[in-house]
Amino acid sequence: MNNPKTEIETLLLVDDTPDNLVVMKKVLQRALPQVEIVTFQKPAEVMGYVRSANVSAAIFDVQMPGMNGIELCQKIKSTEETRHIPVILVMSQEASTGFKAKGLAAGADDFLTRPIDNDELVARVKVALRINLTKAQLRRTADQTQAESVQLGHVLDDSLNEIFMFDAQTLRFVNVNRGARENIGYSIEELRDMTPLDIKPEINAETFAELVKPLRDRTKEKIQFETVHRRKNGTLYPIEVHLQLTSHDTPVFVEIILDITARKRAEEEKALHLQLIEAIGQAEKRFIIKTSDQEVFGGLLTDLVALTGSEFGFIGEVFFTDKEEPYLKTNAITNIAWNSATRAFYAEHAPGGMEFFNLKTLFGAVLASGEPVIANDPVLDPRRGGLPEGHPPLGAFLGVPICIGNKLVAMVGIANRQGGYDQSVIDFLQPLLSTIGQLVEARRNITARKRAEEALRVKLEELQRWQTATLGREGRVAKLKTEVNELAARLGESPPYGTLESLERKENP
């Protein structure tokens, strides 16, 4: 095994299970081809290697025979020439609670739990490598001259991370790199009159004092936590904080900030998709076990409003008048009654479905055009139809038609999502909208079948009466048999009285 070259980053993987090493190495090599990856199965061999190698970060499995990962981490962190190496400990989900506390005490920088998510593995390794690079930059410049200190300022300014330095006593910022200034929106002059508490709205003085106590006590070299930063313009963004306390004549906190907006957004989108899948599954379950239509569509509406962050909405089935004009009959509608009269109206009509025929409204535009309607300023939208007096304000509206093939069968309407609606909301809801359309169509088919079955039953009873009362009227009996056969055919069943042709011949000899 060759020592890694000093000009490239080296990642050390230690696990007594060869398959684990093979999988992690393959994932990381694909994502980080510029990083050299060195593997060990025996923890006892690691210390000799890291003392002479330029290791940028390390991943240790916790549960190994002989020397476990926590013990190996403790050795790394207690050795002067290796204590700077970021260490990530890998443990099982079941053992994570107990081992995390021990790992933190041993100086671990981060943790992963099995089964390991590949994206999370790559992301955490990237963070460890960036932290190591920044720490290396800080170490190299610690004992340099004033000219080298200026050079350090340039390095910090050029860093892709946000770096804040603030006085350990006053907490006032003494230096903030360009990336941080550009994202936070304050000038260096403004920041020098501020402290971290001014840009971290979720943290007060008492909480911050408790957070940094391990650094002041020297029981920890670094702490890591998540919070939010508030920009000068008032907007917030989520961050991951890596905080250290330098031990120079004038102690300074060094804070490396990672903007985790993309990561948080991905986590939120994943959670929403899981909720969407759960909503679809629950609706199908309610339909299969034959709960009431009110329960099926009422549950869907509750999920639809929650998934989109809307305030209220409706799900409705589309029918057509004799003049082929569409109208809406609600399957479920949010109760937004605002006085005794509207509350009484809702109680009387909502369970059986409310019917709406006026097409000169926002939802009427959906029915008339068969296209989605997005109205983020309904008051000025020319398609609006106005609101009854006392109706809750309508700040934004989204109406989406639901088709089976080319046939318009239903639509949904939701309102008052913060920030309004756009095409991405419609795209996200497509699986749920398809489910609503399928359930409406399935219910129609069930209803049509029940009607046909009832008509067949009536014809059979009439036929039996004729056969009993008027045995000589063969023509009428044959006609009834023909009608019975036709109804049976519509239900997909075999004609109970032979072929229609033979009956027609008997009726018209």
Image (cartoon, rainbow, N blue to C red):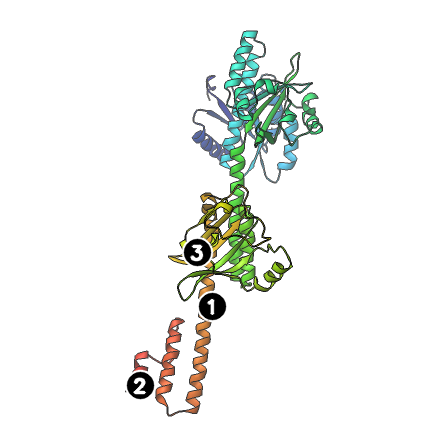
Whether pointer 3 and pointer 1 mark residues with C-beta atoms closer than 8 Å, the reply is no
- Distance CA(mark 3)–CA(mark 1): 23 Å
User: Which part of the image, by quadrant, shows the C terminus?
Assistant: bottom left
Q: Tell me the quarter of the picture where residue 79 sits.
A: top right
* Amino acid, disc 3: Leu
Q: Which mark is residue 506?
A: 2
For the point 45% across and 87% down, the residue is 465
Q: How many residues crowd mark 3 within 10 Å: few (<14), some (14–19), many (20+)?
A: many
Image coordinates of residue 264 in percent, x first then y, are: 54, 36
Q: Which of marks 2 and 1 precedes in the sequence?
A: 1
Identify residue for label 3. 367
Location of residue 264 with respect to 293 vertically, above or below: above
Q: Which residue is mark 1?
A: 447
Query: Is 423 on the left-hand or right-hand side of 147?
Result: left
Residue 325 locus on image (x, y percent) = 41, 61
Numbered mark located on residue 40 in the image: none
Q: Nearer the viewer, mark 1 or mark 2?
A: 1
Residue 181 image offset from top left, x and y in percent: 55, 22
Mark 3 and mark 2: span between their CA atoms? 50 Å
